[in-house]
Amino acid sequence: MSPNGIDIHPRKEAFKEGIAALTGLATSVVSDVLGRTIGAVGILPVNKSSVSVCGNAVTVNVRSGDNLLIHKALQILQPGDVLVVDGGGDVSRALFGEIMMTVAKSKGAIGCVFDGAIRDVDAFEKHHFPCWARGVNMRGPYKDGPGSINVPITIGGMVVNPGDVILGDCDGIIALSPNDALQGAKLGKEKEITERKTIQSILDGKYDDAWVDATLKQKGVL
């Protein structure tokens, strides 16, 4: 890192095979099949309508309430990227709003994630640009730095590395390394088939919930 606390690294190329395999899967399903340990906590969708993205992580780490390095990151965004920002969980100032969102969208980015606050909420809905954030605040940011681009960050307790596959929907956000993406997609698709069968059995009046009492018996309850 430079003496001024600013650290900028090149964008990681997207893992296109993993992105294609995970697209359309539910975050809850993929999280379940990978041990229920991945997923950001407290980072929720801003958009009122249904949202879903699957793309390449461009990561940014900033000082609380400062968005100078986010502006720099906008310059390197490419189609299919998801901007992921570690703002330290601070929601006292918005890091991102309609103008920056418009720049990101013009670059081909497909969504953004903030462990911090954003503003101009209606614009994200109006322009169909998916966003997840810890909070909303109308107060604007500083533009002094320091910060880093394309380094490992943490959002909502989840580590995100540049080049990870970001999968997001109405339930939240998960990040998968290229090594985990294809396995998560394979197991996720298998689990979705199982869940559809379970739901159909409920609708048909054939749902078997005997496992509940069997589990309680094992615990000495019944």
Image (tube, rainbow, N blue to C red):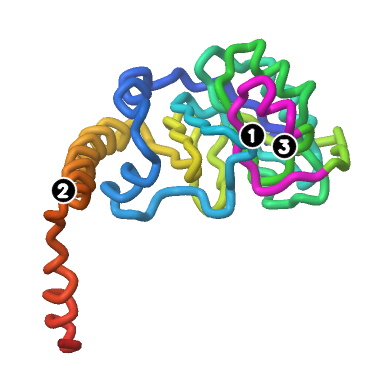
| Horizontal side, residue 157 vs residue 180: left or right | right
Task: Identify the element where label 1 is drawn.
Answer: strand
Between the residue at mark 3 and the residue at mark 1, the CA separation in whole angstroms equals: 7 Å
Residue 220, x across and y down, in percent:
16, 88
Q: Is residue 122 magenta?
A: yes
Residue 123 is labelled as: none
Residue 47, x across and y down, in percent:
62, 35
Quick one: label 2, few (<14), some, or many (20+) residues within 10 Å? few
Between the residue at mark 2 and the residue at mark 1, the CA separation in whole angstroms equals: 49 Å
Q: Quadrant of residue 77?
A: top right
Q: Which residue is mark 1?
A: 60
Lower sequence index among marks 2 and 3: 3
Q: Amino acid at mark 3?
A: Gly
The number of numbered badges drawn on the structure is: 3
State if disc 1 and disc 3 touch (CB < 8 Å).
Answer: yes
Name the residue located 38 percent from the left edge and 21 percent from the top edge.
15
For the N terminus, the image quarter is top right
Q: Is residue 199 visible?
A: yes
Lower sequence index among marks 2 and 1: 1
Nearer to us of marks 2 and 1 is 2
Lower sequence index among marks 3 and 1: 1
Q: Which residue is mark 2?
A: 204
Q: Which residue is mark 3?
A: 147
Q: Amino acid at mark 1?
A: Val
* Segment colored magenta: 121-137
For the C terminus, the image quarter is bottom left
Q: Quadrant of residue 148?
A: top right
Task: Identify the element where label 2 is drawn.
Answer: loop
